[in-house]
Amino acid sequence: CVHGEGRVTKDLPIIIPSHGRAGAVVTLNWLPTGILCVAERQAPAYRAKYPDAEIDTHPDDLIGLIPKRQWIYERYGDCFMVDDDVIKMVSLTTPAGQPGETATGEHARALIERLYDEATDLGAYLFGFSAFGHPLAYNPMKPFSLTGIPLGAGLGIRKSDKLFWNTSLTAVGDYWIGLLNAHHHRMALIDWRWYLYPVKTFKAAGGAAGQRTMGTEQRDNEILQATFGSDIVQRKRGSTLASPTHGQQRSVRLPF
């Protein structure tokens, strides 16, 4: 992984939190060096299905994706977390009429590590990729941004004593950590050129599907609004490029 004149990172932990998906972790198809993080009682099933994968285990009484993210953060510090149902890492810069470029293996890892290096150099504590999979959402004049929230199926974080996940939430951990980061650190590094393409929300078995409902989505929104303000966290209205996928989907409007 050689890029520019800055440092080259070789040991950034890339973690794949997973639950109840032994044999169905599609992320390993393109990111085989990711570390699976699963409950202790589920580890034998995962090891049987993925004998070549590195597997880390957490206590069985740690239930839910957001508590798992907090546990990973406390354990690893600087790291990049990728959902276990990401089908591919795809470029949004491919010219019209050409096959879409994807990143796999060492190429994908190099892109993540490079973004981590750049975030470290800039002093950004959160980093990630585009939250929108539509090529028309990509502006070639603005391939990077330093404001906003890295949403989507992958999130990079550097250790900060001001950042933590609210474990009372069910499924909006990226919004919580992004808004908390915006409040304390103001800056996040987003590379809009790449997108982590996931299985559609609520479509995949396992993971957070057993806990996530429209009721929990509404409750999560209420917690976000109570903490950060209803002017900041609003109901998503949709646009010409994307419509809300469900009635409780939210959007964020940062004042800077």
Image (spheres, rainbow, N blue to C red):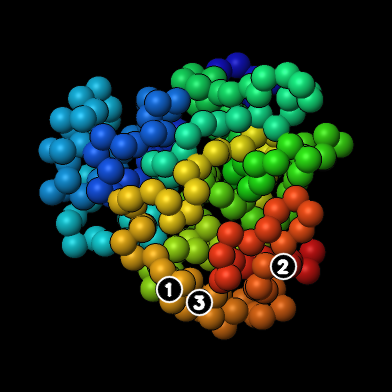
**What number is the disc on residue 237?**
2
- Earlier in the chain: of badge 3 and badge 2, it is 3
Q: Are marks 3 and 2 in contact (CB under 8 Å)?
A: no
In the picture, the quarter occupied by the C terminus is bottom right
Tell me if I can see residue 110 in this picture: no
Q: How many marks?
A: 3
Q: Nearer the viewer, residue 143 or 20?
A: 20
Q: Tell me the element at label 2.
A: loop
Nearest to the observer: residue 13 or residue 27: 27
Residue where numbered disc 3 is placed: 218
- Which residue is the extreme one toward the top? 2
Q: CA distance from mark 1 to mark 3?
A: 5 Å
Asked if residue 5 is positioned above or below residue 244 in the image, the reply reads: above
Q: Is residue 1 left or right of residue 5?
A: left
Q: Is residue 241 visible?
A: yes
Amino acid type, mark 2: Arg
Which x, y percent locates residue 203?
43, 51
Which residue corresponds to the image point at 78% horizontal and 69% vertical from the top-left?
A: 255
In three-dimensional space, the C-alpha distance between marks 2 and 1, rounded to whole angstroms, equals 20 Å
Disc 1 designates what residue?
Answer: 216
Amino acid, disc 3: Gln
Q: Judge the density around disc 3: few (<14), some (14-19), many (≥20) Cα neighbours within 10 Å.
A: some
Where is 124 relative to 254, above or below?
A: above
On screen, residue 99 versus residue 17, left or right, reads right
- Pointer 2: residues within 10 angstroms few (<14), some, or many (20+)? few
Dot 1 amino acid type = Thr
Q: Are marks 1 and 3 in contact (CB under 8 Å)?
A: yes
Residue 14 image offset from top left, x and y in percent: 42, 36
Left or right: residue 194 compared with residue 143: left
Instruction: Tell me residue 23's x, y (percent).
Output: 26, 34
Q: Residue at x 24, y 28 (%)?
A: 50
